[in-house]
Image: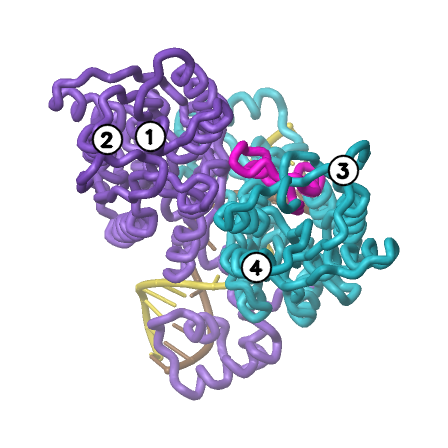
Chain colours: A cyan, B purple, C yellow, D brown
Amino acid sequence: MSKVTSLEVARKAGVSQSAVSRVFTPGASASAKTVEKVKRAAEELGYRPNVLARAMVSGKSRIIGLVVAYLENQFYPVALELLSNALQAEGYHILIFTAPNSTDGVDSVIADLMDYQVDGIIAASVSMSSPLATRAREAGIPVVLFNRGQDGGDFSHVTSANRAGAEKVTRFLINSGHRRIAHIAGWQGSQTGRDRAEGFQAALASAGLRPFSVVDGMYNRAIAAECARQLITGTRPDAIFVGNDHMAFAVLDEIRAAGLTPGKDISVVGFDDVPQASWGAYDLTTWRQPVNRMVDATVSLLLERIETGTPAPKKIEIEGELILRGSVRLAEGVAP
Amino acid sequence: MSKVTSLEVARKAGVSQSAVSRVFTPGASASAKTVEKVKRAAEELGYRPNVLARAMVSGKSRIIGLVVAYLENQFYPVALELLSNALQAEGYHILIFTAPNSTDGVDSVIADLMDYQVDGIIAASVSMSSPLATRAREAGIPVVLFNRGQDGGDFSHVTSANRAGAEKVTRFLINSGHRRIAHIAGWQGSQTGRDRAEGFQAALASAGLRPFSVVDGMYNRAIAAECARQLITGTRPDAIFVGNDHMAFAVLDEIRAAGLTPGKDISVVGFDDVPQASWGAYDLTTWRQPVNRMVDATVSLLLERIETGTPAPKKIEIEGELILRGSVRLAEGVAP
DNA sequence: CTGAAAGCGCTTACAG
DNA sequence: CTGAAAGCGCTTACAG
């Protein structure tokens, strides 16, 4: 039950409490002798500054609030780990809030979050309301949306170029000889889902094709599986572009369950390139969202806002790339 | 840039600052009239108590430090989400620290963590040193190890019954007609890895069998894959018990890559029952660690320690169960 | 460089 | 029930 304070260290070292504080404050002035005495006393007593007290007086908690909702999709644990590492390296830590997947739920979670005087907020793949965004701005807390754009000019966000990615995927499918192309879309209530669906439609249109069908898979495994089941009954598409890898795995499972072979009887492309996509059992051709670059951009953007206090929103789009694996049948001589 | 304080609310409501504090302190006494006035003023000003200030004076931050290391293994994101939900429901939140997988790394991370005056620490699948455990105890911060036992009587932990589970898995393999049974073990530097390996050995021994082979897969996908490759070259085992599902997926991929069929040419059993184990492409027979019950136990144990201050360590083991799927060849008439 | 002092935003005895 | 006051453990002008 210790909790050694700076005052005790000061007494032991024979200096003032302020001196102790300065020794532990980067950039503060203290003579070599003082530093030496204080460090020794602190060491002996096992003293470490109380981060919360420091946060209260300095107004900087060095805590970043992270709101997440879809941990079952491997993209998010990966992002979480990278985010945490990057932030830890800068002396920040993540206070994590799991949110129900509704704007109301997210709003109340973010309100809680602000009570902790977080220095910034990262909302991963969830939407928040404009009033709440306003409140965050008034409180001087920068918010960055990760992997989720949002209409209204008030948000900073980092996404990949979803529309362009979906277009390229679709064009690749067309170029490799597919003509009956379906889309199991990401949730149409989300910007990412809509952008990908638009890219899909645009690429088809400009090739003079019509979609075989477009259905909303809601970024949900069970729903995507059901969509796939329907699609492969009767007249089948020759390719399915799926709104993310997490759903694409379900689609592959259904295709095989129906006795068909992905990449032969029917082509499947995902979106994300989560680690499992490269595993033997799935071997999924997919569009890579470069999560490491997205994380880097998110962290720099957020820290820049925190340190400079710039409130103007900034929207960053990272380029993705097509990752060729076995789930797509290639026509002869096709270069993607 | 607001940050409304209790003093401003007090002025607006025409009461003292202490009165405002009482209105926001559950169990404190305030007249209906005061509550009413304060609530209205707070509402209009958008006041919310500063959690950090409260934490400093009360000594309770309502923050739980969580140390994690293996987010690529789906077991941990699942646990993280459940943990976060359960803790949120009790008014606690998780400050997350990603740790390098070494005792030194974990120690330094936990020391950082304690600077945040966390009320408790959950260390998921990592080991910490005894000196650090002592420091945590002296600071009055309860620590619970999740899914990782540790020698030395100083730690509370919650695991599943690893040894018993591994025994039952192995016995099941024997009963279903397998005789050349190999074990790709979990990391032998960890208690869970050793317990499972011991259970395996014990079950074989009591059936008068010897292991086909035992190798350390280190809970690592690439290493497990390499182990599998070696195992299926030349004289093969007829079954492989793998130390966790994450490695088992790699083993299944390798078996198929060699042109063999899991559940027919060779049986595979995992440990954990992560969501992917039930997905069509893997359809993995495995030992379920009931993650929800493990999480519940962890949270109750931790909160009990926080609220009562009991320091005595407590070791909780949760029973698991065998989940039958397609990756094991069943002998005729075998009931697991 | 260094100490005394004020103050960060709260909670909590202590009197009334 | 309620207000004035002390104090949680720090940082940071302010004088020296």
- Residue numbers of the magenta segment: A268-295
* The N terminus of chain A, quarter of image: top left
Please tell me which residue lies in front, B239 or B273. Answer: B239
User: What whole-number distance in Å separates the C-alpha atoms at marks 3 and 4?
Assistant: 24 Å
Local crowd size for mark 2, using a 10 Å CA cut-off: few (<14), some (14–19), many (≥20): many
In the displayed structure, does residue A155 sit left or right of residue A220? right
User: What whole-number distance in Å separates the C-alpha atoms at marks 4 and 2?
Assistant: 38 Å
Between label 1 and label 4, give the one nearer the viewer.
4
Q: Eyeballing the image, is A284 above or below A237?
A: above
Q: Is residue A48 visible?
A: no
Q: Residue A233: which numbered mark, if any? A: 4
Q: Are marks 3 and 4 in contact (CB under 8 Å)?
A: no
In the displayed structure, does residue A297 sit left or right of residue A8? right
SS under mark 4: loop
User: What whole-number distance in Å separates the C-alpha atoms at marks 1 and 2?
Assistant: 8 Å
Of pointers 3 and 4, the one earlier in the residue sequence? 4
